[in-house]
Image (cartoon, rainbow, N blue to C red):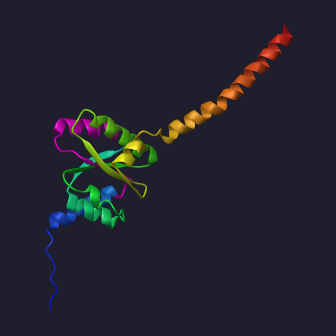
């Protein structure tokens, strides 16, 4: 008996291939519900994310599920329900910056963050919100360098004061 295979429209196959090639360039995916947002609001959000080297794409859930499965990003199906847009990020700092932008933007727009998949880890809404409040890696390094620099600066000033006192 012949095996049944559903016909796939070529434009759908092409759309999934294009989406797979785009999504494979990113390692962070923040899923949002954009219901109620205007085109101007979505464009403004895209501009803010683009400044942080991220992208914001409205996706068809069925295509996104196929793409995420192909890329071995398992567990994301729960976030792909209802109207969905995805913030695509590269790197830890970009993911943190994008999550901050999304939560700040959600204060004045009907945007809702559903969850995220960043560096192989699945985050729910509360976890990604906590992640967005953390300082970036560069901010932490700057803070550490400032902390390490303060005692050395004080020592240098003290030694200079001793030299100045002896020369007078």
- Residue 161 in the magenta stretch? The answer is no
Q: Position of residue 44 (x, y in %)?
A: 25, 35
Placement of 13 over or under 27, stated as above or below: below
Q: Residue 149 falls in which quadrant of the image?
A: top right
Q: Position of residue 62 (x, y in %)?
A: 21, 62
Is residue 134 toward the left or the right of residue 88 in the image? right
Identify which residue is drawn at 31% across, 66% down: 69
Q: Residue 121 falls in which quadrant of the image?
A: bottom left
User: Is 9 in front, or is 105?
Assistant: 105
Q: From the image, which quarter does the N terminus lie in?
A: bottom left
Identify which residue is drawn at 17% across, 64% down: 12
Placement of 11 over or under 88, stated as above or below: below
Which region is colored magenta? 24-51
- Residue at the top extreme, as displayed: 168
User: Is 92 in front, or is 132?
Assistant: 132
Q: How many marks?
A: 0
On the question of residue 30 being in view, the answer is no
- Residue at the front extreme, as displayed: 126
Q: Residue 106 falls in which quadrant of the image?
A: top left
Is residue 142 toward the left or the right of residue 148 in the image? left
Q: From the image, which quarter does the C terminus lie in?
A: top right
Identify which residue is drawn at 56% across, 34% down: 142
On the question of residue 59 being in view, the answer is yes
- Residue at the bottom extreme, as displayed: 1
Is residue 131 toward the left or the right of residue 64 in the image? right
- Residue 45 in the magenta stretch? The answer is yes
Q: Position of residue 161 (x, y in %)?
A: 78, 15
Q: Position of residue 57 (x, y in %)?
A: 25, 49
């Amino acid at each position: 008996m012949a095996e049944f295979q559903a016909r796939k429209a070529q434009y759908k196959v092409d759309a999934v291939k294009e989406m797979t090639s785009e999504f494979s360039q990113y390692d962070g995916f923040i899923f949002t519900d954009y219901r109620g947002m205007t085109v101007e609001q979505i464009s403004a959000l895209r501009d803010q994310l683009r400044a942080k080297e991220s992208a914001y794409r409205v996706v068809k859930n069925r295509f996104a599920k196929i793409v995420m499965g192909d890329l071995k990003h398992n567990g994301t199906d729960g976030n792909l329900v209802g109207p969905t847009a995805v913030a695509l990020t590269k790197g830890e700092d970009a993911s943190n910056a994008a999550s901050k932008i999304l939560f700040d933007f959600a204060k004045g727009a009907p945007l809702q963050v559903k969850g995220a998949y960043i560096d192989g880890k699945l985050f729910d809404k509360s976890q990604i919100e906590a992640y967005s409040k953390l300082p970036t890696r560069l901010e932490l390094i700057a803070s550490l360098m400032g902390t390490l620099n303060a005692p050395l600066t004080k020592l240098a000033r003290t030694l200079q004061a001793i030299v100045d006192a002896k020369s007078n």
